[in-house]
Amino acid sequence: MSTIEENLRSISERVKSHSSTMATEEAVKTAVVLPFLRALGYDVFDPTEVVPEFTADAVGKKGEKVDYAINIEGDIRILIECKPISVTLEKKHLDQLFRYFTVTKARFAILTNGRTFNFYTDLEETNKLDSRPFLVFDITDFNANILSELRKFEKSSFDVDAILATAERLKYTSGVKQEIANLIEEPTEEFVRLVSRNVYEGQMRAQAKEMLTGVVRAAFRDVIMDQVKSRLSSALADTQETIRTIDEPTAEEPDIVTTEEEREGFMIVKAIAREIVPAKRIQMRDAKSYCAVLVDNNRKPLARLHFNRSVKYVGLFDGDVEDRVIIQSLDEIYGFSDRIRATAQKYVSD
């Protein structure tokens, strides 16, 4: 497991267990923000690299400071403003970051309360901080996609162009996902009318509107669940013969037993990868130390399930070597969907 992931999980557990003690801004800085910056490879003990209480000229309010500024190769590149964990982050908390962003060479700004991290840049107007973040994540619930984006902010690989290349897509994807989530919980009248117009022929009076709003909410959730069940069912149907074969011990490895967790993990990986390669090409091969998920054969590893131990790992192959990441539950495999699909993509034309 990479150092950054290990450190972030440690911070995550700290916030889960001790958030009640982070009632002040200083507590958030000490317990979360400085360890977070250290996880990204910055020297938090070097005040010329991680500059505390940063000030700059002509910011509009004399004596105003930003909590931290990150100096990379002689230029201020990241500004960080911290709030107590009990504070809900809002646009009004961006005021200082707005002013400092325009008078420094900063390209990114982070607003955090120790649990939620909002990342901003200037996609809409050069040298003017956007009012909406391009990346938002909860430190207690980060996943593989978030980890992939955070790695771009590591000191050793910090690349403005690489971050900006995906920032716009992330910004609008995040916004659309939030709008969809809002529609699932509270469908608007406009949306209810849109999806009901071909199935309900009566007038949209108050009683009909109330009834259809409940129907749309329930149907929205059912569609999502049906999609998940369909993928898992298809993977299961294509897998039965493979599982029966794997269950039979081979002469070379006579004591192998494929567990239910390995079966389920295999089906999850297969359900993800079948969007890229045909399901019939995705195979399982169990061994004493791990259960391999392959495309065609051993030379094309898709993932490895290291479940034969108290701490469970998933091995991923989107890079040059296997990257093992700890998981607490099988559901976390879905968090690596993009990485699994990227690996599958390498074998499409083989």
Image: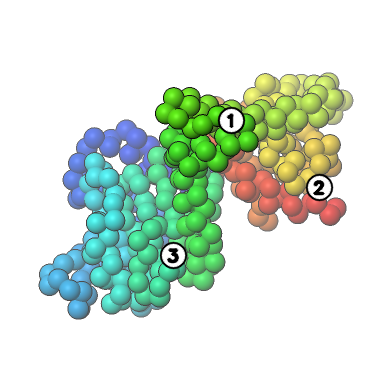
Residue 216: image x %, image y %? 53, 31
Give the residue displayed 25% in from the left and 47% down from the top: 28
Seen as rendered, the residue at the extreme front is 203
Q: Amino acid at mark 1?
A: Tyr
Residue 93, image quadrant: bottom left
Q: Residues within 10 Å of mark 1 (few under 14, many from 20)?
A: few
Q: Position of residue 286 (x, y in %)?
A: 75, 30
Residue ID for mark 1: 200
Q: Residues within 10 Å of mark 2 (few under 14, many from 20)?
A: few
Between residues 213 and 74, which one lies in front from this camera angle? 213
Using the numbered discs, state the Cα–Cα distance from disc 2 to disc 1 in whole angstroms. 54 Å
Tell me if residue 38 comes above or below residue 275 in the rendering.
Answer: below
Is label 3 in a helix, a strand or a loop? helix
Badge 1 vs badge 3, beta-carbon distance below 8 Å: no
Residue 73 shown left or right of residue 99 in the figure: right
Element type at mark 2: strand
Identify the mark at residue 163; answer none if there is no mark.
none
Q: Which kind of residue does numbered mark 3 sit on?
A: Lys
| Residue 97 falls in image quadrant | bottom left
The mark nearer the N terminus, 1 or 3, is: 3
Dot 2 amino acid type: Arg
Task: Say which residue label 2 marks.
Answer: 299
> What residue is shown with label 3?
155
Asked whether the beta carbons under mark 3 and mark 2 sit within 8 Å of each other, the answer is no
Instruction: Identify the mark nearer the N-term, 3 or 2.
Output: 3
Crowding near the residue tagged with mark 3, few <14, some 14–19, many ≥20 C-alpha atoms within 10 Å: some
- Give the residue displayed 46% in from the left and 45% down from the top: 179
Q: Can residue 158 be seen from the camera position used here?
A: yes
Q: Secondary structure at mark 1?
A: loop
Asked whether 282 or 251 is in front, the reply is 282
